Every structure is written in C-alpha cells, then in structure tokens.
Amino acid sequence: MLFVSDNAKGKIEEIMASEKLAEDFFVRVSVTSGGCSGLSYQMDFDNESQPNDQVFEDNDVKIVTDLKSFLYLCNTTLDFSGGLNGKGFHFSNPNASRTCGCGESFSV
C-alpha cells in the first residue's frame, strides 16, 4: 500500500485544478537509479496505465507505481510540507535505510 497525507492530498488537488487536469489523471510515483544515496523518487501526473502498474487509492487520491518501484515504496507515505525548511513533496519511506540530506534520494 502507498499512503497520501492530508497535506499532500490538498496540494495534489490544488495542482490538478490549476493545471486543469481531467479526473482520469492520477499520481505516478517511481524509483530510479541516481542521486547521492543511490535511488531517487520520481513523481508526475499521468492518465495512461501500464501493464504492470500497481494501483492504490488513499485519502481519495489515486496513486500508481510500477511493480519494480513498489518493492522499494511499500508502505511509503507521500507528504507535502509548505514550511521554510524543505518546502515541497517528500516521501516517508520505512524501507529506506539511509536518505541524503535533501531527502531526494535514498538507499535500502
């Protein structure tokens, strides 16, 4: 399962409304190689499903990931912080054994 905090839900809805995205769009999250800790998070809006997609809905937000990425993201919460220290989306990932200082990458 992937989870979405109330703050992330609010920001996702705000972005979708400002970009005038149709209701069939969802949040796609994936993990790619890179970053100072070895693995990086990718997040975008999408409206096309892929054959091996894992689909979740939490807090009325549809979130989709590929099977390989889900192995790294299982039980992760997508959050959003609007504060001065680290404004933006971030992932609270219980599978990460180490994260970089900026929170953009992690290792398991």
Image (cartoon, helix red, strand yellow):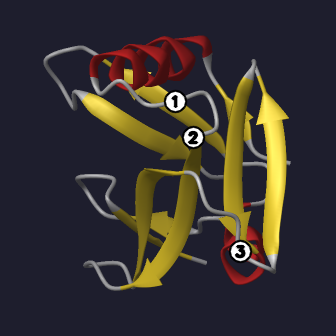
Identify the residue position indicated by label 3 in the image: 50
Amino acid found under the numbered disc labelled 3: Gln
Position of residue 86 relative to residue 69, above or below, is: above
Residue sitting at x 75%, y 18%? 59
* Mark 1 element type: loop
Gap between marks 1 and 2, in whole Å?
Answer: 6 Å
Question: Is 76 displayed left or right of 88 in the figure?
Answer: right
> Is residue 101 found left or right of 29 in the rendered image?
left
Query: Residue 25: which disc?
Result: 2
Q: Is 73 on the left or on the right of 22, as rendered? A: right
Q: Is residue 35 above or below residue 74?
A: below
State the SS at label 2. loop
Q: Percent x, y for residue 52?
A: 81, 79
Q: Is residue 5 visible?
A: yes
Residue type at tag 2: Phe
Q: Is residue 98 above or below residue 7?
A: below
Residue contact at pointers 1 and 2, CB within 8 angstroms = yes
| Circle 3 Cα neighbour tier, 10 Å, few/some/many (<14 / 14–19 / ≥20) | few
* Quadrant that contains the C terminus: bottom right
Q: Which residue is mark 1?
A: 22
Distance Cα–Cα, label 3 vs label 2 = 13 Å
Q: Nearer the viewer, residue 96 or 45?
A: 45
- Quadrant for residue 37, please give it: bottom left
State the CA–CA distance, disc 1 to disc 3. 19 Å
Residue for point 86% across, 48% down? 1
